[in-house]
Amino acid sequence: MGAVAVVIGIVVLAAILLTAGTWWWARTIASRMKRQDAEFRPLEAKTDRCAACDGVGTRLEALPGWPQGTPGEVRCYRCGGTGLPPTKDHVPDLWPTPLGLTLRRLRHRG
């Protein structure tokens, strides 16, 4: 009976640590994206094109799981592939995934 309680305690502690780590990671990314957005807005106002992809709409990035040095062409996270700067009320997410949705919610709160 005592061993079961210890195992349950370890599982609960691991879940709490995982949640706290994920929250910290999401806040760190949200902070960086907000800072980057503030840096890109003046450039985009001058050039009228996305500053992250320089108006191309795609970016060459090394994708996870690919051999090092093998770039993959991905749609720009900031403009969504249009090459135009995002609207004033839109703060782009790094990934259009559940993490991106979480970051969007955190931005609206903070």
Image (spheres, rainbow, N blue to C red):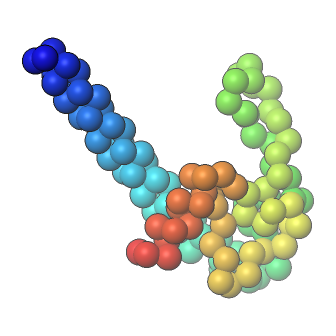
Residue at 86%, 61% in the rendered image: 81
Residue at 46%, 53% in the rendered image: 26
Image location of residue 60, percent across then percent down: 81, 42
Find the residue positioned furthest to the front.
1
Q: Decide which of 38, 103 is in the foreground and name it.
A: 103
Find the residue positioned furthest to the left.
2
Residue at 82%, 79% in the rendered image: 48
Residue at 39%, 52% in the rendered image: 23
Tell whether 86 sits left or right of 36. right
Q: How many marks?
A: 0
Tell whether 79 sits left or right of 104. right
Image location of residue 63, percent across then percent down: 72, 33
Q: Quadrant of residue 56?
A: bottom right
Image location of residue 55, percent across then percent down: 86, 65
Q: Quadrant of residue 72?
A: top right
Q: For residue 55, say whether it is visible.
A: no
Q: Quadrant of the C terminus?
A: bottom left
Image location of residue 84, percent across then percent down: 84, 73
Q: Decide which of 14, 23 is in the foreground and name it.
A: 14
95 w.r.t. 108: above or below = above
Tell whether 17 sits left or right of 48. left
71 w.r.t. 84: above or below = above
Q: Quadrant of residue 54?
A: bottom right
Q: Quadrant of the N terminus?
A: top left
Q: For residue 89, say whether it is visible.
A: yes
